[in-house]
Each structure stands twice: as C-alpha cells, then as structure tokens.
C-alpha cells in the first residue's frame, strides 16, 4: 500500500511559531522576507456550494486559515458559486457551519464569486476590446473535437477572427438572453497549438438559462471556474491562492488573465489532495450515495463529511491535529484511515468520561447479595485527568454484563466469567459463577453468582488475584439505549478503483452499520446530550446521536478502542 511519500510530518518539526513546517509556509516566509505584497498574507478557502464539506476540505481549511493565523494575516471564505445548476443554499449553510466548527474564522469576510459577476463581465468586455477574447459559435462537442490532444495541436475556431465590434455585440446579446443554452461561448484567444491544453482558447462564459441561488434570473451567462477564480482572488487582494495539485496546469491560464487585465496578482500554489483509505472524497460520488439512499444523508456518521464526522463524535481538535501531522506536499498519496482514528483516540482519551454500558446484556443475579440493597460505588471519571473527579455508580443484586463476558464452556485462554470462575466487577466486588438458567432453546439467559463482601472496590484483602475485570450495570438503575456501531463504509482501500469493471458502489460494506437496541447504560448518562463524549469502558468511544433524547437515548460508536495504527507503529519500530 502506498502512503504519502513525504510521510506524516513529525510534530517536533513544527516551527517555534507554531505552524507545521511545509513548502507552502516556506514560500510565504520568503515572500514576507522580500516584502512582497507589503508583507501581507491573505489566503482564502473557496468551496463550491455543490455539496457538503469533507475531510479533504478540512485539510484545505486548516492550511489556509492556519497560515493566515500564524502570520497575522487574513483568510476569506469565498463561495465559488459559478455553476447554478449544481449549487444550493442548503450547501452554503452547511459549509458555513462546518467551516466554523473546524475553527475557520473569516470575521466579516464571507464572499461569493457571484458578487463579482458584474465586474467579471466588464473585464471580459475589456479582453474582447484588447483582442484577447471572442464569441465562438461552436458547440461543446465541436470545441472538444477541435481541441487537439497532448501530441497534436488544436484547430483555430472559424469564429476566432471576428471583429471586436461583432464580438461586443454578440457578447452583449448573450447576456441579454437572445441565444439558447450552448449555442455560443466566450473564449479567451490564446494559442490553439499550446502544449498546455488549458491555453487552447479556453472557455470564459457559457450560456445557461438557469436560476442562481443568489442572483436569481439576473444572469443567463455564467463565467467558468478558470475565468472567475483568479479574478475573484485579485478583487479580494489575496496574496497566496492555495489550491490542489490538479490546478497546476491551470496556473499559466490563471496568470494569463491577471496579466492581460493588469490587476493585482495573487500567487497560485498547489498542494496534494487528501486521499484516505476506505474512503471516497469526491462530492459527486458522495452526492450519489445520498441521493440513492445508500447512506442516511450527508451527515450520516459513516460519511467522511465534516457533518458526518461531527455526528459520529469526532472533535475539531482531532481533525486539526491529523491535518497538521499529515502535512502538505507536492505529490498525491494516500493516507491510512487508521491514522485519522489514531489522532481521534488520542484526543478522546484525554477528554472522554469513562462510563459503563452493556451493549448485549446478560442478567446476573448475585444470590448472597441482600435483596433491596443498593450501594454507591465510587468510579473514576477519567484516569488521564484527575480534575474530572469521580462519580457514584449504583450496585445491586441484579446486574447486566456483556453476553461476551460469559462462556458456559470457556475455551483455553478465556479468563472471563464461567462456571466456578471468579472475576472482578469493575469498581464492584469479586464474583464467582455458581450456575446458569437456560431458556427452552438451551440458551443461557441468566447467570447466578456469589460475591465476596471482603472485596468491595475490587481488591481482595488476602491478596488473591483474578484474571479479568468486567464491566456491568445495575439492572434496576440502568437506562435503556440504542447503540449504533459502524465499520468502514467501503470494503476496499481504494473504492474508486474501477479497474475490474466495478464501481465504487460495488465496494459498499454491507456491515457498515449495526444497530443494537436494548442496550443498558449506567444511569449517569440518562440526560446525555449531543456534544458529550464518553468512553464506554472496554468498548470504545461513544457520543449521543443527533436523534438522541432523554428517555430515548441513541449513541454512536465514534471509534473502537483498539488502535491499529499504534500497532503498526510498534511493528515498524
Ligand atoms: P470535490 O472533488 O470533492 O468536489 P472540489 O475540489 O471540487 O472537491 P471545492 O468545493 O472546489 O471542491 O473545494 C474547495 C477547496 O477545497 C479547494 O481549494 C480544493 O482544492 C480543496 N479541496 C477539495 N478537496 C480536497 C482534498 N481532498 N484535499 C485537500 N483539499 C481539497
Ligand atoms: Mg472544485
């Protein structure tokens, strides 16, 4: 399996100023040293509102806002909303929420490329007047055919030498709505023989009689990404326009427009897109999963979207630490999903309260424990954080333990409860199994035990040892809950791999969601609210789901306890 060639940057390589060292940062430091842009640093995060943000966007947000913060600069949020057919206000709203949640702070600088439509139009007219743009009547298919290939030059459009007057007239009439969709375009007049296909008279405007979520029906021509993006950067006074590597070949075009127009010139810098194993980071494919009901929405906890990760129980801090540690480079690679989970566990380990919950309950009756008695056992809230204190957990005669923690016929090396065996109940007593009750089908439905009153708190005064400690809840005190367990959404490391004539939906994991009802949770969680994070002892990290409410608790398992990454690291050492 390939990994990012630069490898995760080590935290100790971070600069004293706080920002992780990388080539983009080096460029900025050099520019500041040279007094470029008067020493200003101004970046932007430019999502297209055609889907929800995902973990790849988080990398870009972390980089852009992080650099601005580090160098006392600014970072704008700009919606790159030039494609009305795919965009929607729902996406705008979710992006604002998610970018904020990740720590993006654009103060009062939230902009839309659509705010610049009039200016962009005027500049297009200017380019027509200087002979650098023309109206072309070729269809999209014809443009494609005449574009040439990497080895063959393209052909000049028969409309390439229209007079400035004719171009101005036609472009004005395009705007006025005289022509149907697709009948004409405005193209930059550059070089149909350029080895860079992006410079072969690229489109600047297309006709699209489509209502825009902000400008309504004011426009029926819309600028392309290539024409709108650099000019929007320039209008906002951006100094460093940081984007992903696939735009490297577009940089000459970015520079060409800016130079022809003679306006402020931001520098485009490209970095590697984030790819994660077992994960898709394409809005188009994520949208397909949502639309086809393969997941329960954009914020399904299995989705790599920011809203999905949040609902799953990720913290913005864990995502930020992940982004800082993977660094940025000039080569695309693929990062292990387990690395993201590693940083998540590290963060949750510090902050999550430890509690006891039984997901698949088995009744345990302690025969020699007095009927009706309830003891309050003292339990530690977080061994990593003494300030989190302790809490009382009720203990009584009838408990639930995990079905997994009992075997009538224990295999070798199974040290948990079984007939005749003594184990420790966490924060409770030592108990010994004395018998079982079975249903008609022969399944164990109840386990009988005795307890040793001398072992309160979990230690025997005579020093005898037990080989395992299991968690429990008191049956009459526990609160019921639904618990949702997740596995990777895809079964394949690279679900985009279509080499075997398959598509990504063929690799959906049928077991990605398991819903457990009838779970029993310790009573301190009866009022658990969204935003709280817990470690269910021995089971993993969990959080209340958006649908959870008192009386009808629903928890998501954020991540299991086992840290495969830590294991891999250990092996590598
Ligand atoms: P998608 O392919 O998911 O539609 P996109 O690049 O079209 O992504 P935009 O909304 O245009 O999505 O992206 C906004 C910003 O986020 C851009 O600057 C883009 O480069 C960056 N970005 C998008 N995906 C990733 C990724 N996987 N890793 C890093 N940055 C990304
Ligand atoms: Mg894009």
Image (cartoon, rainbow, N blue to C red):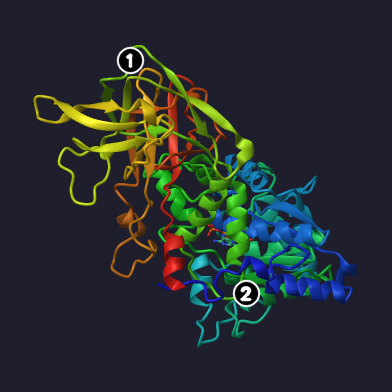
Q: Position of residue 308 (x, y in %)?
A: 50, 44
Q: Which mark is residue 37?
A: none
Task: Indicate whether 555 appears above or below 267.
Answer: above
**Nearer to us in this view, 281 or 435:** 435
Query: In the displayed structure, would residue 191 be above or below residue 449?
Result: below
Q: Quadrant of the N terminus?
A: bottom left
The answer to whether residue 186 is seen in the rendering is no
| Mark 2, secondary structure of its residue | helix
The residue to which callout 1 is attached is 370
Spot occupied by residue 365 in the image (x, y as percentages of width and height): 27, 22
**Residue at the front extreme, as displayed:** 462
The residue lying at 29 percent from left, 66 percent from top is: 501
Q: Is mark 1 within 8 Å of ligand 1?
A: no
Q: Tell me which corner region of the image, top left, top right, bottom left or bottom right, holds residue 498.
A: bottom left
Task: Return the disc, 1 or 2, that comes first in the chain's sequence.
Answer: 2
| 308 on left or right of 167 | left
SS assignment at label 1: loop
| Residue 468 location (% of width, % of height) | 33, 43
Which of the 4 image quadrants contains residue 426?
A: top left
Mark 1 neighbour density, 10 Å: few (under 14) some (14–19) many (20 or more): few
Q: Nearer the viewer, residue 40 or 359?
A: 359
Task: Determine which residue is flagged by label 2.
Answer: 248
> In the image, what residue occupies the spot 20% across and 39% down?
407
Relative depth, front residue between 400 and 184: 400
Q: Which residue in the rendered view is the most extreme toward the bottom?
A: 151
Q: How far apart are the alpha carbons under marks 1 and 2?
A: 75 Å
């Amino acid at each position: 399996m390939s990994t990012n060639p630069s490898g995760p940057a080590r935290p100790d390589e971070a600069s004293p100023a706080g920002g992780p060292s990388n080539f983009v940062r080096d460029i900025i430091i050099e520019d500041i040293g040279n007094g470029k842009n008067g020493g200003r640093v101004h970046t932007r995060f430019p999502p297209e509102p055609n889907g929800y943000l995902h973990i790849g966007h988080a990398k870009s947000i972390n980089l852009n806002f992080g650099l601005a913060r580090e160098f006392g600069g600014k970072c704008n949020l700009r919606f790159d909303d030039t494609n009305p057919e795919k965009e929607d206000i729902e996406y705008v709203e979710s992006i604002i929420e998610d970018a904020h949640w990740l720590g993006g702070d654009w103060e009062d600088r939230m902009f839309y490329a659509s705010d610049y439509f009039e200016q962009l139009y005027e500049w297009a007219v200017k380019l027509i007047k200087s002979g650098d743009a023309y109206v072309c009547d070729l269809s999209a298919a014809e443009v494609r055919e005449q574009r040439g290939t990497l080895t063959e030059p393209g052909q000049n459009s028969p409309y390439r030498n229209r007079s400035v007057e004719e171009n101005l007239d036609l472009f004005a009439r395009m705007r006025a709505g005289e022509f149907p969709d697709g009948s004409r375009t405005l193209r930059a007049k550059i070089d149909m023989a350029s080895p860079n296909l992006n410079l072969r008279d690229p489109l600047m405007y297309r006709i699209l009689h489509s209502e825009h979520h902000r400008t309504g029906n004011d426009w029926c021509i819309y600028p392309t990404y290539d024409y709108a993006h650099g000019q929007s950067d320039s209008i906002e006074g951006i100094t460093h326009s940081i984007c992903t590597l696939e735009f490297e070949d577009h940089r000459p075009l970015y520079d060409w427009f800016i130079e022809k127009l003679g306006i402020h010139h931001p520098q485009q810098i490209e970095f590697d897109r984030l790819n994660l194993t077992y994960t898709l980071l394409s809005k188009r494919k994520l949208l397909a999963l949502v639309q086809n009901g393969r997941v329960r929405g954009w914020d399904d906890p299995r989705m790599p979207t920011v809203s999905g990760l949040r609902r799953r129980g990720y913290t913005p801090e864990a995502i930020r630490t992940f982004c800082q540690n993977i660094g940025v480079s000039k080569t695309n690679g693929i990062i292990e999903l387990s690395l993201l989970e590693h940083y998540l566990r590290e963060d949750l380990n510090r902050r999550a309260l430890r509690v006891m919950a039984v997901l698949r309950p088995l009744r345990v009756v302690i025969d020699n424990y007095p009927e009706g008695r309830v003891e309050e056992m003292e339990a530690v809230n977080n061994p990593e954080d003494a300030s989190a204190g302790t809490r009382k957990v009720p203990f009584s005669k009838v408990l639930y333990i995990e079905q997994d923690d009992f075997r009538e016929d224990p295999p070798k090396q199974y040290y948990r409860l079984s007939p005749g065996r003594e184990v420790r109940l966490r924060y409770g007593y030592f108990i010994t199994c004395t018998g079982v009750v079975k249903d008609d089908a022969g399944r164990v439905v109840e386990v009988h035990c005795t307890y040793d009153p001398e072992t309160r708190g979990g230690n025997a005064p005579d020093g005898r040892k037990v080989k395992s400690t299991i968690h429990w809840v008191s049956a009459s005190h526990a609160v019921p809950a639904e618990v949702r367990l997740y596995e990777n959404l895809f079964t394949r490391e690279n679900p985009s791999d279509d080499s075997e004539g398959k598509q990504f939906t063929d690799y959906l994991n049928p077991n990605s969601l398991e819903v457990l009802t009838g779970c029993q949770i310790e009573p301190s969680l009866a009022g658990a609210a969204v935003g709280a994070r817990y470690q269910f002892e021995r089971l993993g990290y969990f959080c209340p789901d958006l649908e959870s409410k008192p009386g009808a608790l629903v928890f998501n398992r954020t991540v299991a306890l086992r840290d495969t990454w830590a294991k891999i690291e250990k092996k590598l050492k």
